[in-house]
Image: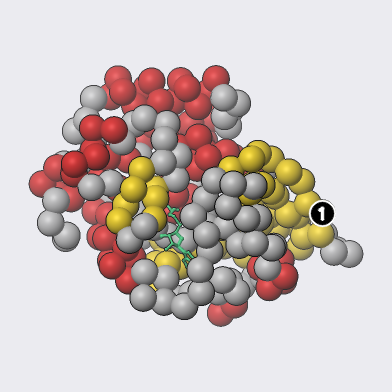
Amino acid sequence: MMAGIGYRGIGMTSQRTRERLVERLRLRGITDPRVIEAMRNTPRHIFVDEALASRAYEDTALPIGHGQTISQPFIVALMTQTLLEKPSLTNVLEIGTGSGYQTAILAQLVKRVYTVERIKALLGLARARLRALRLKNAHPHHCDGGMGLPQYAPYDGIIVTAAPEYIPESLIEQLSIGGHLVLPYGRRNQQQLVRVVRTTSGYKTERLETVSFVPLLGGVQ
Ligand code: SAH
């Protein structure tokens, strides 16, 4: 286990601050009870540096080192809720593990999650957190996920948590028919969060929200 995780304890911060966050998510349109339950049960404070733990239940993105951020809870909830509109999610892919928070939410709601991260140090921490929470159906990989993870395709759902400039064709190809891809794309300051649903004849795209994600980058480090 990595230093700090067991030490800080799981579920030790005030239940009240977490309730307040869940209430805020409801007000912003998160209505799926499965998502609400997962957000309520997941200790976000173990996914951030100890110095920021007291801010973990604010509805805001926070730095996780290496120039990356843990996503804002509302966006995590929205992406998850959108993905869950597809019935029976068996095989899901997340691109951009980061802190592992979105992975932990997904792992409680779908059968199997593959998650890929290009920064080895972040992946190591995320892996330890997922292990501490005993989420054995989450499978972290250290690789460049810009083109997806073809070896475990097709996926019923793909969530991308870093923004490419354009929607990568290869991600749509790795979806099963009826599968949902939820991703931000576009240039910094003008990104859109969209859902792409693969159909028998092609795909259809739907806009969800204006967002601000870190960019999807190539290569590993
Ligand atoms: N889901 C994360 C969000 C982290 S920010 C969380 O809840 O904490 C996005 C992450 O995507 C960063 O850690 C970044 O390193 C990673 N990333 C960016 N481009 C990538 C790529 N091509 N392949 C894999 N990971 C990538």
Apparent side of residue 40 relative to residue 161 in the rendered image (left or right)? left
Q: Three-letter amino acid code at disc 1? A: Lys
Determine the residue positioned at 89% across, 64% down: 201
Q: Left of 55 or right of it: where is 69?
A: right
Q: Can the viewer see residue 97? A: yes
- 126 vs 23, left or right, is left
Residue 203's image quarter? bottom right
Is residue 215 shown above or below 16? below
**What residue is pinned by disc 1?**
204
- Picture quadrant of residue 98: bottom left
Q: Name the one closer to the observer, 149 or 219.
A: 219
Q: Is residue 151 above or below residue 80?
A: below
- Along the line of sight, the residue nearer the viewer: 215 or 86: 215
Q: Position of residue 55 (x, y in %)?
A: 29, 33
Q: Residue at x 62, y 55 (%)?
A: 187
Neighbours of disc 1 within 10 Å: few (<14), some (14-19), many (20+):
few
Q: Secondary structure at mark 1?
A: strand
